[in-house]
Image: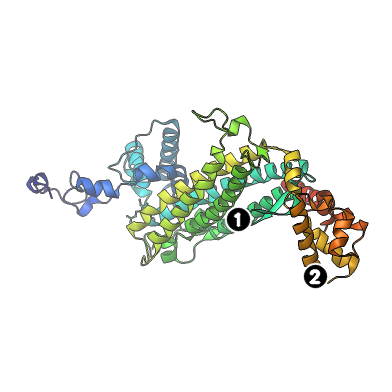
């Protein structure tokens, strides 16, 4: 307490109105206002102003329900609704003055409503608390964020399917351990990400369906004696139904946690694609080129085309996982029901949504105009003896060998080719017969990368005919 605090006279005022300096929303029993640092730690308007549209939407639905149930007069209801519409317009046109003294978005809106319509504004909070109000606003916001993530995921999926359609038979090395393993098609590679991203959409959709119950009407924690209609407000706000337990309704933040975990997995997927773009666009790989719009130069090295966008996308998962971790730790160990700790739930969610949405948009932009270097990919596909498995499979099929023996045979061929510094298809029939005299000229049919890729027709395999089927499926799905 500062000297000034101590010397300030206790406010003599008592009764219905809070003392000067005390908060007009809840300061009825307070003799004076908060310490400056208390206000500073308590205030959330700089963060939760993002919820303004949901807050006004929730209040309008609540007021309409209060009128429908006879709790609020039609006149007051109409004045409240008009006032809230004015506030929405003020905020959207930038003329609204957000006040730190009014703490948060809920009290900023309600305080402004009182400025605009007078005492009737005070009736809006009947049968409601900021506890169910904030849970409702935030859940509505997260549901909208899920829809935006879904739209952004679809755009990226389309970009990948377009690349897959163009490159259903573009051959590249497939990797395990980042070592050339077997030839695959670039189209197949792109569609692997489409599968991942569609699972991401499923996780967001699951999160949204579980976030389909409205907290509004739980009031502070225990429900309310007022004859409210929670189905009415739930329906008006686009929820499926009201949450069945008032304690759960005000203390639950699972919807935010689920959003953050789905966002984390999506961002993790994006980081893998980003890493591949970083690798593909090196001079050493030269598999792909990002457009000028998605490359940056170096101020000192004129030859450079840096994939900064991909690198930043690769990094964003760190932030988003950090946001998930933050909210998990904030919620951990909180007793039922609301605790002010929960005001700290919004920064991580807002931060993650911004990071996720910009990552998805940047990645879609990069993929949409990324150019693939087909000759370079083809050349790399054949390097590193990537058809050794085809040779082993051939020996099983044509010579009736057990796979383990065929594996040894192919390994010896790889050794010989490495020694001669040539590819498997460049060894002579004599070379092959020195390994096993039963090998005949048909072996050359399986050694090229094109034949290798074309032969992998199993369901889910990389053969161009299978890739084209999948492209068609996804084109239909995304149409
Ligand atoms: N600003 C608060 C939050 O975001 C609103 C709820 C306040 N409720 C309360 N009982 N103090 O959590």
Q: Read off the residue under disc 2.
A: 405
| Neighbourhood count class around disc 2 (C-alpha, 10 Å): few under 14, some 14–19, many 20 upward | few
Q: What is the residue that sits farthest to the left in this orientation? A: 7
Q: Depth check: 136 or 477 in front?
A: 477
- Write down the quadrant of residue 118 in the picture: top left
Report whether 400 appears left or right of 388.
Answer: right
Q: Which image quarter is the C terminus in?
A: top right
Mark closest to the chain's N terminus, 1 or 2 = 1
Q: Is residue 247 above or below residue 173?
A: below
| Figure disc tally | 2
Q: Is residue 160 visible?
A: yes
Say which mark, if any, is on residue 78: none
Q: Nearer the viewer, mark 1 or mark 2?
A: 2
Q: For the residues marked 1 and 2, what is the alpha-carbon distance in whole angstroms?
A: 49 Å
Give the secondary structure at mark 2: helix
Place of residue 102 in the rendered image (x, y in percent of width and height, measured from the top left): 30, 43
Place of residue 472 in the rendered image (x, y in percent of width and height, measured from the top left): 79, 48
Report whether 172 appears left or right of 131.
Answer: right
Q: Is residue 69 visible?
A: no
Place of residue 33 in the rendered image (x, y in percent of width and height, measured from the top left): 20, 47
Place of residue 305 in the rendered image (x, y in percent of width and height, measured from the top left): 58, 33
Give the secondary structure at mark 1: helix
Disc 1 under 8 Å from ligand 1? The reply is no
Disc 2 under 8 Å from ligand 1? The reply is no
| Neighbourhood count class around disc 1 (C-alpha, 10 Å): few under 14, some 14–19, many 20 upward | some
Q: Depth check: 136 or 145 in front?
A: 145
Q: Given contact means CB atoms under 8 Å apart, are the residues at marks 1 and 2 in contact?
A: no
The chosen color scheme is rainbow
Residue at position x 66%, y 39% in the image: 286
Q: Read off the residue under disc 1.
A: 205
Q: Is residue 367 above or below residue 423?
A: above
Residue at position x 57%, y 38% in the image: 307
């Amino acid at each position: 307490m500062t000297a000034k605090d101590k010397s300030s006279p206790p406010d003599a005022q008592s009764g219905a109105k809070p003392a000067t300096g005390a908060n007009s929303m809840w300061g009825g029993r307070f003799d004076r206002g908060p310490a400056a640092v208390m206000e500073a730690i308590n205030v959330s308007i700089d963060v939760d102003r993002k919820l303004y549209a949901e807050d006004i939407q929730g209040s309008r639905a609540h007021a309409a329900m209060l009128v429908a149930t006879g709790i609020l007069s039609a006149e007051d209801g109409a004045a409240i609704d008009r006032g809230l519409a004015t506030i929405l317009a003020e905020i959207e046109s930038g003329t609204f003055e957000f006040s730190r003294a009014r703490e948060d978005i809920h009290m900023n809106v309600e305080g402004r409503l009182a400025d605009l319509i007078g005492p009737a504004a005070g009736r809006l909070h009947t049968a409601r608390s900021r506890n169910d109000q904030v849970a409702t606003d935030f859940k509505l916001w997260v549901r909208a964020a899920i829809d935006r993530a879904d739209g952004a995921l679809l755009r990226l999926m389309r970009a990948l399917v377009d690349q897959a359609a163009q490159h259903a038979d573009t051959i590249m090395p497939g990797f395990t351990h980042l070592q050339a393993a077997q030839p695959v098609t670039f189209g197949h590679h792109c569609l692997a990400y489409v599968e991942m991203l569609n699972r991401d959409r499923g996780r967001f959709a699951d999160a949204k369906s579980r976030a389909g119950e409205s907290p509004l009407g739980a009031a502070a924690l225990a429900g309310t004696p007022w004859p409210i209609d929670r189905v009415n407000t739930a329906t008006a706000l686009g929820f499926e139904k009201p949450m069945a337990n008032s304690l759960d309704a005000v203390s639950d933040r699972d919807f935010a946690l689920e959003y953050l975990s789905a966002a984390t997995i999506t961002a993790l997927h994006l980081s893998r694609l980003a890493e591949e773009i970083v690798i593909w666009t090196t001079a050493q790989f030269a598999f792909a080129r990002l457009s000028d719009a998605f490359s940056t130069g170096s101020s000192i090295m004129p030859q450079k085309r840096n994939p900064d966008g991909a690198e930043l996308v690769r990094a964003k998962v760190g932030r988003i996982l950090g946001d998930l971790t933050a909210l998990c730790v904030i919620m951990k160990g909180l007793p039922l029901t609301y605790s002010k700790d929960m005001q700290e739930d919004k920064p991580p969610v807002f931060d993650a949504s911004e990071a996720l949405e910009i990552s998805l948009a940047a990645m879609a932009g990069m993929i949409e105009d990324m150019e693939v270097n087909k000759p370079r990919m083809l050349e790399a596909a054949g390097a590193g003896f990537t058809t050794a498995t085809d040779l082993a499979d051939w020996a099983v099929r044509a010579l009736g060998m057990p796979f383990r023996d065929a594996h040894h045979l192919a390994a010896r061929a790889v050794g010989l080719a490495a020694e001669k510094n040539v590819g498997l298809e460049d060894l002579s029939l004599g070379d092959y017969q020195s390994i096993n005299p039963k090998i005949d000229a048909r072996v050359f049919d399986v050694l090229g990368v094109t034949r290798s890729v074309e032969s992998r027709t199993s369901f889910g395999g990389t053969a161009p005919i299978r890739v084209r089927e999948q492209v068609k499926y996804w084109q239909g799905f995304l149409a």
